[in-house]
Amino acid sequence: MTDETTGRATSIDVGMLDDLAGDPPARRDLLRALRGVTGAPGQDRFSASAPSILTLAEADPARHVLVVRHDGDVAGLGVLHPGGANDRMLALLDGARPQDVVLFRGFLVDHRHQGVGVGTAVAAALPGLVAALARRTGREAFALVVLVVDAENAAGLRAYTRAGFAARGTYVDEDGHTQTVMALAAS
Ligand SMILES: CC(C)(COP(=O)(O)OP(=O)(O)OC[C@H]1O[C@@H](n2cnc3c(N)ncnc32)[C@H](O)[C@@H]1OP(=O)(O)O)[C@@H](O)C(=O)NCCC(=O)NCCS
């Protein structure tokens, strides 16, 4: 199968951990596999570890974990967080209401699956995933997906740009790193 966005021959699937809410043993096994997702050396400055991302998500019902599979293997995770965009992000989104924005956070592709188009394909799938999240939670459609990427994260910037995300502005974080806020229409 050829991925439409990247043109590369591969099979990339994104599901939701929520789908296993009624099957606790299967959910537990999948969580264990997701905790094993690890980035490449040096990438910990761009994202938290998988266990940290999952601990925060398990404690917050507003965070919905995405499960990324590549050729059948668990290859990454991410989190859809409606209402998660903070004031600094919202200030760059032309007056978008917080409840209409979904923050995409905690995105990590396992180092064994990087560089073959997984990140780009997941980013391109986000509007559809966000639309599905609105339907399953019985609310009106969201307007925007937003994310924050370190200005030195070349792979992230490239993946998001290829998927259609546009830079809306930058800010300097508490560690002195420039962060780029990017957004894509969710519907
Ligand atoms: C960022 C990340 C999700 C991208 O995932 P990925 O599956 O490797 O992405 P892709 O394979 O779709 O590659 C995206 C683009 O970046 C390029 N790229 C990959 N690694 C690169 C690097 N170190 N420097 C520059 N470009 C790079 C790829 O060549 C590709 O560009 P192309 O399509 O023009 O060839 C992944 O690297 C990752 O998990 N990094 C650690 C955590 C992180 O940064 N998360 C995102 C926080 S916002």
Image (tube, rainbow, N blue to C red):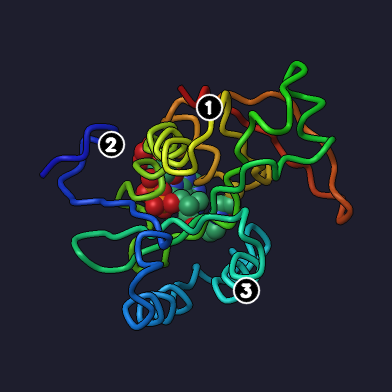
Is the residue under label 2 in contact with that under label 3 (CB below 8 Å)?
no
Instruction: Find disc 1 in the rendering and name its residue.
Output: 140
Labels 3 & 1 near each other (Cβ < 8 A): no
Q: Nearer the viewer, residue 81 or 5?
A: 81
Which mark is nearer the camera, 3 or 2?
Answer: 3
Ligand 1 neighbours mark 2 (CB distance < 8 Å): yes
Residue carrying label 3: 55
Q: Is residue 8 above or below residue 181?
A: below
Label 3 secondary element: helix
The earlier-in-sequence mark between 1 and 2 is 2
Q: Position of residue 51 (x, y in %)?
A: 57, 76
Q: Quadrant of the C terminus?
A: top left
Query: Is 152 or 12 nearer to us in this picture?
Result: 12
Name which of mark 3 and mark 2 comes first in the sequence: 2
Q: Is residue 131 above or below residue 83?
A: above
Rate crowding at label 2 as few (under 14), some (14 to 19) or many (20 or more) other CA atoms within 10 Å.
some
Q: Position of residue 99 (x, y in %)?
A: 68, 33
Task: Tell me the CA gap for discs 3 and 2.
Answer: 32 Å
Query: Mark 2: which amino acid?
Result: Thr
Q: Quadrant of the N terminus?
A: top left
Q: Amino acid at mark 3?
A: Thr
Q: Report helix, strand or loop for mark 1.
A: loop
Q: Nearer the viewer, mark 1 or mark 2?
A: 1
Q: Residue at x 53, y 26 (%)?
A: 184
Please tell me how crowded label 3 is: few (under 14), some (14-19), or many (20+) other residues with Cα within 10 Å. Answer: few
> In this rendering, would 151 be left or right of 12?
right
Which residue does the image show at 45% across and 42% down from the upper left? 133
Q: Could you say which quadrant of the image residue 154 lies in? A: top right
Q: Which residue is mark 2?
A: 6
Residue 115 falls left or right of residue 57: left
**Location of residue 4 in the rendering, given as x and y in whole percent from the top left corner:** 22, 33
Instruction: Give the mark nearest the N terminus, 3 or 1.
Output: 3
